[in-house]
Amino acid sequence: MKIAIGSDERTNLTDRVLEELKQRGHEVILFGSLAENDPEIDWPVSCSKVASAVVTQKADEGIVFCWTGTGASIAANKVSGIRAALCHDAETARGARIWNHANVLVLSLRATTEAIAKEILDTWFSTPFSEDEWNLLQIKRIKQLEEKV
C-alpha cells in the first residue's frame, strides 16, 4: 500500500512511524519536514499535500502530524473526499475506520507515544470499513455535505 505522510516537524515519533510503515511493507510518499526537498513544511501545506495525494490516488491513504493534531486534521479535511481522523488511541482509530471510513490518520506530536502509535497503526491497518446499509448511508450524507460547499 502507498501511504502519503507529512508533518511540519520531524521527531522521534515521525521517524518511528516511518520505520513502522516500511517494516509493514508500505511504500511511503513524504511531504513537509519529512521530505528531503520540500520547501513547504508548514502544517496546512504539508497536510493538504498528503490529502491531495490520497484523493488523486497517488497514495492509498495518508498520515499527518502536527503538535496537537487538531490543525493537521482541519487542514486535511479541507480537501474534498478526505475523512481525516485525529486518533489518540486504538479504539478511536477502530471507530474512525469502521464508521467514518477515515482515509487519513492524524497523530499529535505532543500527545502520542511511540507505543500508542504502534497500537493505533495496528488497528488502523487491520480494521475494514463497515459496509452495512446504515453506515453507507452516513458516508453518503458526508459526501453530500461536501457537494454543498
Image: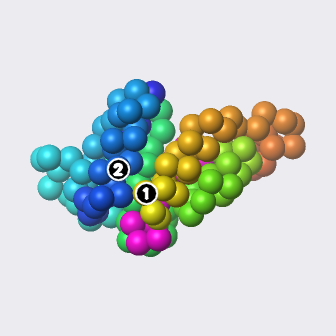
Verify CB contact (< 8 Å) between mark 1 and mark 2: yes
Sequence-wise, which precedes: disc 1 or disc 2?
A: 2
Give the alpha-carbon distance from disc 1 to disc 2, as whole Å. 7 Å
Q: Is residue 52 above or below residue 145?
A: above
Q: Is residue 131 above or below residue 110?
A: above
**Residue 134 lies in what quarter of the image?**
top right
Q: Which residues are magenta?
A: 102-111
Q: Is residue 83 visible?
A: no
In this picture, residue 46 sits left or right of residue 109: left
Q: Is residue 104 above or below residue 42?
A: above
Query: What residue do we see at 38% from left, 48% from top?
Result: 17
Query: What residue do we see at 62% from left, 36% from top?
Result: 126
Judged from the image, the secondary structure of the residue bearing numbered disc 1 is: helix
Judged from the image, the secondary structure of the residue bearing numbered disc 2 is: helix
Question: Residue 44 at what x, y percent from top left?
Answer: 35, 63
In this picture, residue 54 sits left or right of residue 12: right
User: What label does residue 16 carry, if any?
Assistant: 2
The amino acid type, in three-letter code, at marker 1 is: Glu
